[in-house]
Image (tube, rainbow, N blue to C red):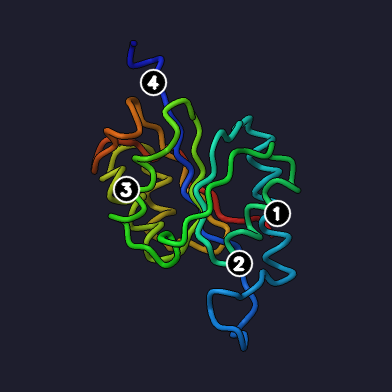
Amino acid sequence: MTAAALARTLILMRHAHAVAGKADGDHERDLSARGEQEARDAGEWLHRHDFGVDEVLCSSAERARQTAAGVWAGGCAEADLRVDEHLYNAGPERLLAAVREADADADVVLVIAHVPGIPALASLLADGNGSGKAHEALCAGFPPAGMAILRYSGAWGDLSPGAASLREFRAPSV
């Protein structure tokens, strides 16, 4: 198999804005009205830019699952969803381990989780590779519903620090 046949896209997304504290605790926080709009906007953007997501790796937090639903409502075609309790507030190492376990046939994987793990993983994987403008945006902060779009050539199981390139960083437009 050629490297071109293994061209992959990894989209690292922070969940959209959530409501403030909830009696049930942080894990059960819902998206706010703004967050619902942000998630739909992200889905519209992914659809408009032809990102056909094959698999979604999602934190078990309610706001992350609602972000995935909003992305689909925005027009991004529904993909295989794997909700993983270990992605809740996970660090970059745990997130990377989950990506390495992505379906071998998935060319585009979307990870929806939390800060600081998501931006740390983007930095770890790209390690300065890719668009300077995207790296500047990433360094300026990773807002709710922000997305880092990375390219990688190889099997997901072989993904390692510095092996990807940051192609684009998108902050929500709502």
N-terminal of the two: label 2 or label 1? 2
Which quarter of the rendering shows the C terminus? bottom right
Mark 3 or mark 1: which is in front?
A: 3
Task: Tell me where residue 33 appears, x and y as whole percent.
Answer: 74, 69
Mark 3 belongs to which amino acid? Ala
Label 3 to label 2, Cα distance in Å?
Answer: 22 Å
Residue sitting nearer the eye, 128 or 88: 88
Instruction: Identify the secondary structure beneath mark 1.
Output: helix
Image position of 58 (left or right of 151): right
Q: Residue at x 48, y 49 (%)?
A: 111
N-terminal of the two: label 4 or label 3? 4
Look at the picture and state if 122 lies above or below 37. above
Mark 1 belongs to which amino acid? Gly
Look at the picture and state if 20 lies above or below 154. below
Judging by the rendered image, the residue that carries numbered circle 4 is 6
Judging by the rendered image, the residue that carries numbered circle 2 is 62
Residues at marks 1 and 4 touching, judged by CB atoms closer than 8 Å: no
Residue sitting nearer the eye, 25 or 154: 25
Q: Few, some or many C-alpha atoms within 10 Å of disc 1 (few <14, some 14-19, many ≥20)? A: many
N-terminal of the two: label 2 or label 4? 4
Mark 2 belongs to which amino acid? Glu
Judging by the rendered image, the residue that carries numbered circle 1 is 70
Instruction: Identify the secondary structure beneath mark 3.
Output: helix
Mark 2 or mark 4: which is in front?
A: 2
Image position of 130 (left or right of 44): left
Give the quadrant of residue 91: bottom left
Label 4 to label 3, Cα distance in Å?
Answer: 19 Å
Instruction: Identify the secondary structure beneath mark 4.
Output: helix
N-terminal of the two: label 3 or label 2? 2
Instruction: Identify the secondary structure beneath mark 2.
Output: helix
Judging by the rendered image, the residue that carries numbered circle 3 is 97
Q: Residue at x 69, y 35 (%)?
A: 48
